[in-house]
Amino acid sequence: MVPDAGARAHALQDIRIALVQMNALTGRRQANLTTIEYYTASAARDKADIVCFPELTVTGYTRRRAAALAETVPGETAAALGRLAARYGITLLAGLPEAGEQEKPFVTHLACFPDRSTERYRKTHLGKSETPFFAAGDRLPVFSSPKACFGTAICWDMHFPEVAACLALQGAEIIFAPHASPAVSGNRRDLWLKYLPARAYDNAAFVAACNLVGEAEPGRTFAGGLMVIDPRGRVLAESSSDGEDMLVVDLPARTINDIRCGRARSMRQNFFLRFRRPELYGRLLEPEDRS
């Protein structure tokens, strides 16, 4: 569910999350849903509260076939994921191309809750190779579960500091970052360590990233990667497996609550966003020439 005005009535509670590194086969919706159920059941057995799958998990990441594979939300897949969330008593985050009134689909990540309610985030920042095939979303929603407030930023979104800051200012304590990053982009761990710790540290939030892995279609191989960064910018947990994998991680509430509730004992543990001066940032709101 979406919290009122982005605020939470209580602080973060200790929470266990699961991140899945998955080979999502292009156009094989039912096969991918079967894999999603397998890992959802595994996460539930491990007593995870939330399980997050990579970008466009349901259909596999494809640009040229995205429009043909797109579905409406609500729709058949959203209902199927909602049933899984209810069956296993877990909040399930998974992605699909979402059809709408516009010509191009959105890159959408669903948040399906145990009560079968479903929310969605539509990727807001598209790379040059994506803009011919996808439409960009225009909202940065934050969602509330019994133990945490969280937001989603998909792959390229995480390169924009404003996205993480907006989510944290609305109360997000966890930022899930599902990816579809290809192997040709370089060493995934080295790249993530250049910017994910900054997003976590500056915003006093946990950042939880997962990626597709393996060959989904001829000529397209994904690099994998599972990593959780704590609010102080440190790697809390990670996996370097070359195949499908799941990482289950306990997120301690005190780490964030001490910072956000003003109990920090040093400058580096302050909630920096509390000291912003928005009156200085007008340049950020000026439109740019993108030609």
Image (cartoon, rainbow, N blue to C red):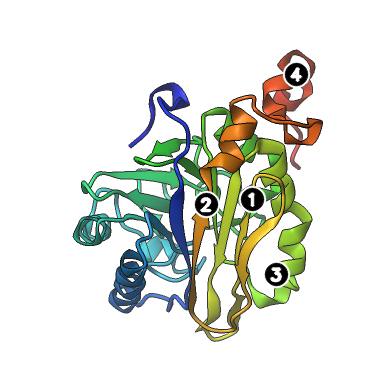
Q: Amino acid at mark 1?
A: Asp
Figure check: 274 above or below 48: above
User: For mark 2, what is the residue?
Assistant: 251
Q: In x, y percent, where is residue 191?
A: 75, 63
Of residues 205 and 27, the one drawn nearer to the viewer in this rendering: 205
User: For mark 4, what is the residue?
Assistant: 282
Q: Are the two marked residues, 1 and 2, in contact with CB atoms closer than 8 angstroms? A: yes
Q: Earlier in the sequence, mark 1 or mark 3?
A: 3
User: For mark 3, what is the residue?
Assistant: 188
Which quarter of the figure is the N terminus placed in? top left
How busy is the neighbourhood of tag 3: few (under 14 within 10 Å), some, or many (20 plus)?
some
Figure check: 243 above or below 83: below
How busy is the neighbourhood of tag 1: few (under 14 within 10 Å), some, or many (20 plus)?
many
Q: Are the two marked residues, 1 and 4, in contact with CB atoms closer than 8 angstroms? A: no
Q: Secondary structure at mark 1?
A: loop
Q: Amino acid at mark 4?
A: Gly
User: For mark 1, what is the residue?
Assistant: 230
Figure check: 9 above or below 149: above
Q: Amino acid at mark 2?
A: Leu
Q: Earlier in the sequence, mark 3 or mark 4?
A: 3
Q: Secondary structure at mark 4?
A: helix
Q: Amino acid at mark 3?
A: Arg
